[in-house]
Image (cartoon, rainbow, N blue to C red):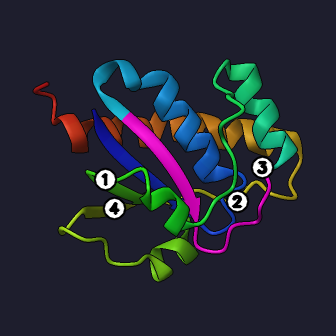
Amino acid sequence: MKKVLILCTGNSCRSIIAEALVNKTLQTKGIEAFSAGSRPSGRVNPDAKRVLEEEGAWDERYHSKTIDEAMKEGPFNLVVTVCDDAKESCPVFPGGVKTIHVGFEDPDGQPYDAFVETKEKIKNDLLPIIEKELNGGNE
């Protein structure tokens, strides 16, 4: 199983949504996701949870956590930052793990539609990139 770590600042919206969608969609292709925040909020945004429940991707194990907590799940094959702040503060990972940035606007504090839009963008834009990076089309 190849592992991807998805980072944002608060680990309450974008990275949690991405983690859940990767696990729902790409686990059968040998890819497992984890998420963390550079400054975790300690909570999952209720609208992020709702959008994942509607997608059939929510699991109670998803929670806001630090990078150090997430590192216990490694080693990782890929690190993805999904916000500019996390990109700037992203630590260097041991073993030369490839790090890429695919940014998404933070839906926190926005109407629920913004969460739906973010979920769709992550599903359509990020998941194919992660699959290509980790499986390269030749599984």
Q: Residue at x 76, y 21 (%)?
A: 54
- Looking at the picture, how far across and down is residue 76, in whole percent? 31, 53
Identify the mark nearer the N-term, 3 or 2: 3
Which of discs 1 and 2 lies nearer the camera? The answer is 1
Q: Residue at x 39, y 24 (%)?
A: 27
Secondary structure category for the residue under label 3: loop
**Separation (CA) of disc 4 from disc 1:** 13 Å
Identify the mark nearer the N-term, 2 or 4: 4
Identify the mark nearer the N-term, 1 or 2: 1
Identify the mark nearer the N-term, 3 or 1: 3
Verify CB contact (< 8 Å) between mark 3 and mark 2: no
- Looking at the picture, how far across and down is residue 104, in whole percent? 58, 56
Seen from the viewer's position, the closer of residues 106 and 94 is 94
The residue to which callout 3 is attached is: 44
Secondary structure category for the residue under label 1: loop
Q: Residue at x 30, y 71 (%)?
A: 93
**Separation (CA) of disc 4 from disc 3:** 24 Å
Q: Residue 8 has which mark?
A: none
Q: Residue furthest front?
A: 72
Q: Residues within 10 Å of mark 1 (few under 14, many from 20)?
A: many
Q: Residue at x 63, y 24 (%)?
A: 57
Seen from the viewer's position, the closer of residues 32 and 75 is 75
Eyeballing the image, is 45 above or below 36? above
Is 39 magenta? The answer is yes
The residue to which callout 2 is attached is: 106
Magenta residues (range)? 32-43
Is residue 93 at least partly visible in the picture?
A: yes
Secondary structure category for the residue under label 4: strand
Q: Residues within 10 Å of mark 3 (few under 14, many from 20)?
A: some
The residue to which callout 1 is attached is: 76
The residue to which callout 4 is attached is: 100
**Could you tell me the amino acid type at mark 4?**
Ile
